Image (cartoon, rainbow, N blue to C red):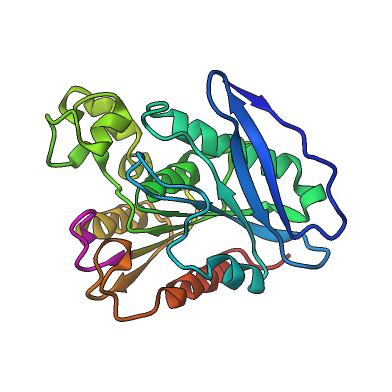
Amino acid sequence: MTDFHPLPEPRATLTHANCVVSTPVGYRPLHLDLHVPPGDGPFPVLLWIHGGGWLTGSRVWTVDQRFHERMVARGYAVADVDYRLVLEATYPAQQADIDAAVRWLRHHAAALRIDPGRFAVLGESAGGQLAAIAALTGTGDTAIQAAVIWYGPADLAGLREQHDPFTAPAILLGGPIAERAAFARLASPLHNIHPEAPPFLLVHGTEDETVPFAEAAGFAEALRAQGVRCDVLTVEGAGHVFTGAAVEVGTLTEAGADFLDDVLPAR
């Protein structure tokens, strides 16, 4: 359960705002930073969902240090989203928090100069799982029109450490995967695919040992089997968080913007 917060009186030239978007009962307020291009809009909005194994991380940390600058220059508003970490609350609290942020943004879209019909998510690592779930399960006021996933796990139910209660996915789900198989499937993007899902771009390193490239390949194949567009950008030689990549991470941000330009055309 969350309390819904109204928007503070906006400035006509608002380019950045920090707002409380929900207050889950018994928890800290959850914030959102919004970066909006200059002009009248309405602008498409990209929700940035950070990684950290669901245990750590912050909405203010990005892989590409010029991420906001690049996306705003391309005409996208960027919303950096808070969600509860797993030692605060187990799943599906994180999904509920992202849904609350999407509802808040859509409710205040006119005042914020964003387009309620052009919402996208970009999540990295654990945030990739959350972004993909948001894209696959959102409907109505939580609907997402496009998803970009950077090295996110697609199948929590198929992880190797099925009986270990201390892995990050086990802590996320509240216990060993082997004891929560159905719940793990519910939290897995791979097991939530449907023909009406929005288009996806998967960006993944070939040498990722934390979330193997095979996860992206299998997820892409399953999406395409349902008739869903899924582009895959293979980052040769890159490990998790694009370590060791031969390309500068900014080029991957720009590739995501190119994809969004294609699937979220101006209206």
Q: Residue at x 37, y 40 (%)?
A: 192
Q: Quadrant of residue 175?
A: top left
Q: Residue at x 41, y 73 (%)?
A: 249
Q: Residue at x 79, y 57 (%)?
A: 14
Q: Position of residue 151 (x, y in %)?
A: 32, 58
The N terminus lies in which quarter of the figure? top right
Point out the stretch of residues depicted in magenta: 204-213
**Along the line of sight, the residue nearer the viewer: 136 or 204:** 204
Q: Is residue 212 magenta?
A: yes
Q: Position of residue 85 (x, y in %)?
A: 41, 35
Q: Residue at x 22, y 74 (%)?
A: 237
Q: Quadrant of residue 143?
A: top right
Q: Compared with residue 93, is residue 59 higher up or lower down, i.e. above or below?
A: below
Q: Would you say 97 lies left or right of 236 here?
A: right
Q: Would you say 136 lies left or right of 175 here?
A: right
Q: Position of residue 73 (x, y in %)?
A: 65, 74
Disc tally is 0
Q: Position of residue 256 (x, y in %)?
A: 49, 68
Q: Compared with residue 188, is residue 131 higher up or lower down, i.e. above or below?
A: below
Q: Residue furthest right?
A: 12
Magenta: main secondary structure equals: loop
Q: Would you say 246 lies left or right of 252 here?
A: left
Q: Is residue 229 magenta?
A: no
